[in-house]
Amino acid sequence: MAHDSHTLERPAVLDPGASNVRNAIVLVVILAALSVAHFVSPPHHPWIHDFLFKVTYVPIVLAALWFGWRGGLVTAAITGAVYIIHIRMQLAGHHEHSQVGLILELVLYVFIGVMVGWLSDRQRQAQARIAAANAELQESLASLREKTEALLAAEESLRRADRLRAAGEIATGLAHEVRNPLGGIVGAAEIITNPKTDAKDREEFADVLGHEVKRLDRVIGDFLDFARPGKTPEGECTLRDELDFVASLTAGPRGKQDAEFKCDDVANDLRIGMSADAFRQVALNLTLNALAALSEQNGTITWSAKRQDHTVEIRIRDNGSGIDASVRNRLFEPFVTTTKGTGLGLAIVSRLVNDVGGTITLVESSETGTTFELTLPLA
């Protein structure tokens, strides 16, 4: 079976036992060489023996570094025992220093071996703690990475489920809105094509047929406006002029003749960074919704606008019956409506406002009226 050329080879792990054996052999060789050098050096050359006594610190320090304070103590003790024999047998009467001084230097061997070994043990313990902390940190990092990946996967799954849910709701709403006019069209067509239907009824149901076809066309048109990929409406317009146009447009059969339309608090020269067509669609949808909520008498729709640093804060308020609490949090979702409309108007309004970097929110809604607030850029 061929091996993957990218497979990483595991690094060779050093055996601590083999390393300790090698270090011990090195120490034995050094100590043996120093001992032999002591015994073969002439006693009447004290400087040679002084030099060898100083060199002996090297194996003691190495033993302390490699094996800790115990290794340093054992090496110093063995070395001291051998050198005491050498001092008593070979250097007695020949060394210019007293034998007591040499014995004190052997005591210094023990002290240096234990002290260096203790410091080496402390260093190893600190390294062990650092290694343990690093291993724990690596485990925590791996666990955090796994949890993060699981969280991202779950988030993506929720997004996918939310998109599917939204698509299902849109499809259900569209099917519901299309089915009603289709039912009317089918029923009217059956009556019109029935030979027993008289001319008067044919004319009446022909009107019904035309009305339902227009209704179906309006549903499809609104849905296409909502679903069409949005392009930022370029241009600007004078806010007061567009509100006056919407007021005149809704004063006829589409509106209520006795409804009062106020926009006195909107400056005549206030211009917004939104095309006239786009803002007319926004204002017309909001105005028609307000008209639908008004009572037959004393209905009032009030528009106001306030200039901010780089935006315009626009409010529309009506004194109608308010919006059902069950749909207030879903007003800008498609096919959510409390009137006889398609439920796409506010969804389209929200998209048009967002396309120019603005916002729309429901400020309040109660039995005494409803207020929407739009934030749009200045021209």
Image (tube, helix red, strand yellow):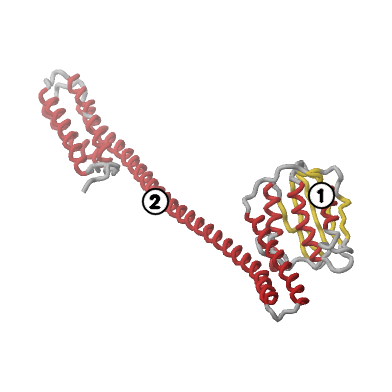
- Mark number displayed over residue 242: 1
Which is more toward the observer, 174 or 41?
A: 174
Compared to residue 376, the image places residue 295 above or below, namely: below
Residue lying furthest bottom = 196
Question: Secondary structure under badge 2?
Answer: helix
Image x and y of residue 276, in percent? 77, 47
Mark 1–mark 2 CB contact (< 8 Å): no
Question: Secondary structure under badge 1?
Answer: helix
Image x and y of residue 348, in percent? 69, 56
Earlier in the chain: of badge 1 and badge 2, it is 2
Question: Is residue 219 toward the left or the right of residue 11 in the image?
Answer: right
Quarter of the picture holding the C terminus: top right
Closest to the camera, between mark 1 and mark 2, is 1
Which is more toward the observer, 192 or 12?
A: 192
Q: Which residue is mark 2?
A: 139
Q: Residue at x 25, y 31 (%)?
A: 104
Q: Amino acid at mark 2?
A: Glu
Q: Amino acid at mark 1?
A: Glu
Image x and y of residue 73, in percent? 24, 39
Q: Can residue 338 be seen here?
A: no
